Image (cartoon, coloured by chain):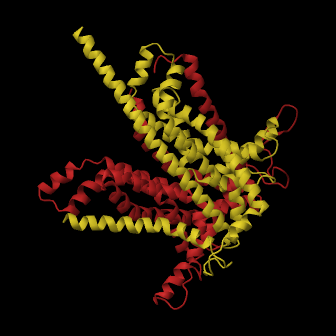
Chain colours: A yellow, B red
Amino acid sequence: MMQGRSWFRLFALIVGFAFLYIPIGSLIVYSFNESKLVTVWAGFSTKWYGELLHNDQILGAAWLSLKVAASSATLAVVLGTLAGLVLSRFGPFRGRTLLSGLTTAPLVMPEVITGLSLLLLFVTMEQLIGWPAGRGMTTIVISHITFTMAFVTVIVQSRLSQMDDSLEEAAMDLGARPSRVFFLITLPIIFPALLSGWLLAFTLSLDDLVITSFVAGPGSTTLPMVIFSKVRLGVSPDINALATILVGVVTIGVAIAGFTMTRQQKIRDRDSQMALAANQQMIESLKKG
Amino acid sequence: MKRLGLTGTNLVTAVPYLWLLLFFLVPFVIVLKISFSDAQISMPPYQPLIHWVSEKALQIQLNFGNFAFLVEDNLYWRAYLNSIFVAGVSTVLCLLIGYPIAYSIARSSPSTRNILMLMVVLPFWTSFLLRVYAWIGILKNNGLLNNLLMWLGIIHEPIHMLQTDFAVYVGIVYSYLPFMILPLYANLEKMDLTLLEAASDLGCRPWQAFMKITVPLSVPGIIAGCLLVFIPAVGEFVIPSLLGDPGMLMIGKVLWTEFFNNRDWPVASAVAIALLMFLVIPIMYYQRAQDAEAGGGLHR
C-alpha cells in the first residue's frame, strides 16, 4: 500500500521537475549550437557568446539593468524591512490594515496596471512640481522599489514572526534603547532574510519588462526591453547565450546565499540556544540563592 | 516593543507608509482621474478635467465616454471574458499539476524537502522573460517537441503549437507553477500526520483519507495558491504576446496596445480601472488571508 504511494510521489516529482527544467536546459544546450537555426544542431560552438560581448546595445542595456537592480534592491530592503518591522512588531494601530494591504497588493497586481498608474503619477508630478524631469533611470528605480519592497516585506515579516522575541525583551530589560536593540539584536538575527530579500528584489528588478516599459524614457532601455524586442522577431542564439550566462550567475548566487544562510542560521541557533541555556542557569542559581 | 519612543515609532512607520501611499495608492487615483478625461494629441495626450472658466468659476468636466466606449465595443468585453477564462483554466491546471508536486515534497524526508523546494524556487529566480522565450524554441513548427514526436513516429507532419491558445496555457502554467507550489507546500508540510494514522486505524483507505482529511485541511493553501496564480494571470501581457496568436484577445495586451500603439491614455486608464474593479475583491481576499497567515505579530 505505502509502496504504491511512494511510486506515485516519485513519479510526480520526476515529471514535475522535468517540466520545470527541460525548457531551461534546452536554452543552455542550444546556446552552444553552431547553427543560427536554434533548434537544428550543427556542432558545438561558443561563437554566440563572442557575438554577445561585441553587442554594444545588449551590453549597455545590461549595465543599466544592473545599476537599476542594485540600487532599487538596496532601497527596497530598507523600506521593506521597516514595513515588515512595523507590521509584525508594532501591534495594532490605526491604519495598519491599509499598510498591510498596500504591502501585499503589489505582489499580485497585474503589472500592466502598476506600470500605467506609475507612469501617470510621474507625468502628473512633472506637471505639478517639475520633478521627475522626464523619465529615465530615476523613475525606473522608484517603480522597482515600489513593487519589489512588497516581496521584502513578506520575507521580513515571516522571519520576524518566527523569531523568538525573548532576546529583544531581555536586551530592553537590561536598558538598551529600541534603536540599539534593533541594530544589535534584531538586525543580525534577521540578516539572512534581508539577504534573500535583497537577492529576490535584485532578480525581480533585473527581470522586469512590463512596468519598466511604461516608466522608461527614450534613452533608458533596460536588458529585458532589448530581449523582448529581439525575441518578438523569433528565436536568436545570442539570446540563448545571454540566458545561459544569467542562469549561471543566478544559480551560483542562490547556491552561495543558500550555503551562507544555512551556516549562519546554524551558528545563530547555537548561539541563541547557549544564551537561553545560560539564562536558565542564571534563573536556577537565583532561585537557589 | 511598547517602550519604543513615540517619535521613533512614528518615523519608522511613516517612511514605508508614505512611500506606498505616494507610489502605490495615489497613482490609482490619477488613473481614475485620467480615465474620465478626453484624449488629445499633445504631451501628455489627455485634456485636464478642471478648467478655469472665468476668474472664480471652476468647471469640472467628467467624461464617461471612455467607459461607454468599453461597454459598447464588444472587443473589450471579449478581451475581459477571455482573460478571465484563460486565467481560470490556467489556475485549475496549475493546481492539478502543483498539488501532487507539493504533496510529494511535503511527504519526503526533512532533509530532501529543503533541496526539492530550492529546486522549485530556482527557476523563479531566473528570468521570467527568458523562460517564456525557451518555449518558443520548444513549441515552434521545427521546434524540439515536434522534432521529438516526428522522430518517435507519433506524428508525420509538425503540429502547429506556437501562436495557439495551447501555447499560452503552457506558458502561464509553466511560469506560475512555483506560485502554486509554495503556499500548498507551506500548508501541507504543517499538517498533523497523526490524523491520517487515526483514519487508517479506523479502517480508512489511503485514497479516502487523502480526500477526506488532507484535501479539506489544505484548503487555505489551495486558495492562496489559486489567487497568486489567477490575479496576475488575468492581466498577463508577456506570455500571450510571445506565445499566443497575434489576434488573441487578452486584456493586458489590449491595455498595452491602447497605451503604446494608439497612444490613447484615457481609454488605457479606463481599461485599467475596469480590470481593477474586477480584481479588487480577489485581491482583498488574498490580502486578508495573507495577513491572517503572517499576523502572528498582532496577538502580542
- x and y percentages locating residue B286 in the rendered image: 46, 47
At horizontal 58% and vertical 41% (from top left) the residue drawn is: A149
Nearer the observer, A271 or B131 = A271
**Of B222 and B153, which appears nearest the observer?**
B153
Which x, y percent locates residue B288?
Answer: 45, 42
User: Could you tell me residue B243's position as x and y percent?
Assistant: 60, 71
Q: Is residue B107 visible?
A: yes
Work out which residue is located at the far left of the displayed protein and give it: B202
Q: In the shown orientation, is residue B81 left or right of residue B199?
A: right
Q: Is residue A1 left or right of residue A159?
A: left
Left or right: where does residue B149 sit relative to residue A114?
A: left
Give the number of marks: 0
In this view, the residue farthest toward the top is: A289
Residue A269 vertical placement versus B275 (above, below) = above
Q: Can I make out residue B64 in this image?
A: no
Quarter of the image with the N terminus of chain A is bottom left
Residue drawn at x 38%, y 24% as measured from the top left:
A166
Q: Quadrant of the C terminus of chain A?
A: top left
